[in-house]
Amino acid sequence: MSDGKTQPTTSVRDPRREPWAAVLVEIQGRISAQQFESWLRPVRPGTVVGECLELHVPNAFTREGLLQNCGGLIRNALRDVVGWRDPSLKVSVDVDDKATRPTVRAAVPEKLAFPAAAPTAPKREPQRIEGLLQLHDDYTFENFVVGPHNALAEAAARAVIRNPGRIYNPLFIHGRCGLGKTHLLQAMCFELLKARPDVRIAYLSCESFINQFIAAVERTDLESFRARFRRLDVLIVDDVHFLANKERSQEEFFHTFNDLHQLSRQIVLSSDSAPPEIPTLSERLVSRFRQGMVCHLDAPLFETRVQIAEKKAESLGHALSKDILEFIAKNVQTSIRELGGAVTKVIGTATLMKVPVTLDMVREALGEVLLDRRPRVTLDGIVHAVTEHYGMRRADLQSKRRTKPLTEPRQICMFLARRLTNLSLEEIGAFFGGRDHSTVLYGADRTAARYATDAEFKRSVDQLAAMAGGSLKS
Ligand code: ADP
Ligand code: MG
């Protein structure tokens, strides 16, 4: 280096060998110093297995804060700087904080623990799980609160576990983001493994399926890609709406599905919308997805939200009083993820600022959350747009009459309400003449199907959405 040329790489350690150091360098400028101190400073890197980085933290609170505040940043950095395609994190809470080496694998069932590897050992794929099973330790049935919004899906999941491949195949669970699909799917994995430790099971996101497929195409090695999946007893794919607009991946998925299904291997799928609502999903996949059991996860009702908030607080090692739990449950309705985030924020604020949890303190702590979550589109706005457009009266929409000129706009309203508001099926049904939730689902589904296939219809529904102050694009 005496020639005076800059050698930018000499001071930077090899990101592949030290991914955590590389991640820290990458993200430290993007978060506040306080966040860095709270969430990143306490982290100790553990082993790397495939594209999964293990991190150790001293307590559940840090774990939660780390995942919530920095999880996305870390994964992005692993993608950008380390070059991993599908990075994941495994954050373990160290029981003994003074341990100098990350040997403690708290709360990871033995059978899921990755093969022990010294930090310097070459990367190894986990043996029995073949990189196809990466689970979040907390997503178990014990931590899954059952209420009216998810009772059917939970019961179906349990039935499948008792009788894989024989009863509901596929099991298809759909619901908006943050309502518990991933949690339920992973709970099934834990339970299946408990019952039959030798089960060949894969849980993966649809995105990961697609990426692995594309990588296999690039390597011209579809054989081994296919062989890996065809060997499975149980295939669980999360977020299959990612297949939208991906023709080749759909085709491949179709064959994987068929081969496994013919052998009575269990398939479990989740999606943010019902099969016919997934844009451009081929007809044959739609009908495959519907051929077993389709369950819907709705938004939880108030009582369930209180229970979930309570459970969340418990898992962080704190008890919140009833009025605090109710205040949070009343104000955070959008998703269970947001609800958990609100509880974490309250407990985090109390812990960091060393203040007692009072209603005022909670209001203050959640200030932004509360403002953010106010639904932008209202049922009133939707009804206003639709009645204007069709030149009809609001009372007609809300009436029990079912003549065609009334049914279509009513179903459009239901579709828009489903997509643009956070109201539950029950709430929407109640507004439209006391109809039950299956009527709302049916109405929304019909509109969705036409929306996906009829360009002119789509244009006018898009316009109606805009008039109501929303957009169906996101
Ligand atoms: P989705 O996959 O539908 O977007 P997730 O399964 O990721 O939603 O759930 C979001 C968060 O809410 C997770 O932290 C999860 O543990 C929690 N959660 C969802 N449903 C429940 C439930 N019934 N009981 C307790 N926690 C839940
Ligand atoms: Mg999910």
Image (cartoon, rainbow, N blue to C red):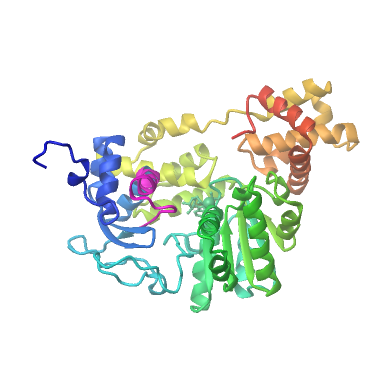
Relative depth, front residue between 246 and 104? 246
Viewer-side residue, 411 vs 301: 411
* Residue 225 against residue 392 in the figure, above or below: below
The image quarter in which residue 264 lies: bottom right
329 versus 19 height, above or below = above
Confirm whether the magenta stretch covers residue 88.
yes
If the image is split into quadrants, where does the C terminus sit?
Answer: top right
Snapshot quadrant of residue 418: top right
Q: What residue sits 29% from the left and 70% below the top?
A: 117
Rendered residue at 43%/44% (across/down): 341
Residue 195 sits above or below residue 131 on the image: below
Q: Nearer the viewer, residue 418 or 82?
A: 82
Which residue in the rendered view is the most extreme toward the left?
2
Residue 167 colored in magenta in the image: no
- Residue 228 is left or right of residue 351, and the answer is right
Instruction: Give coordinates of residue 315: x percent, y percent.
Output: 39, 56
Horizontal relation, residue 82 to residue 258: left or right: left
x and y percentages locating residue 340 in the rendered image: 45, 47
- Give the residue at the far front of this rendering: 3
Question: Residue 449: image x %, image y %?
Answer: 76, 43
- Left or right, 170 with respect to 17, comes to right
> Which of the image's four quarters has the N terminus?
top left
Q: Is residue 148 visible?
A: no
Q: Residue at x 78, y 39 (%)?
A: 450
State which region is magenta.
Answer: 70-91
Of residues 218 and 267, the one nearer the viewer is 218
- The residue positioned 68% from the left and 30% from the top of the image is 379
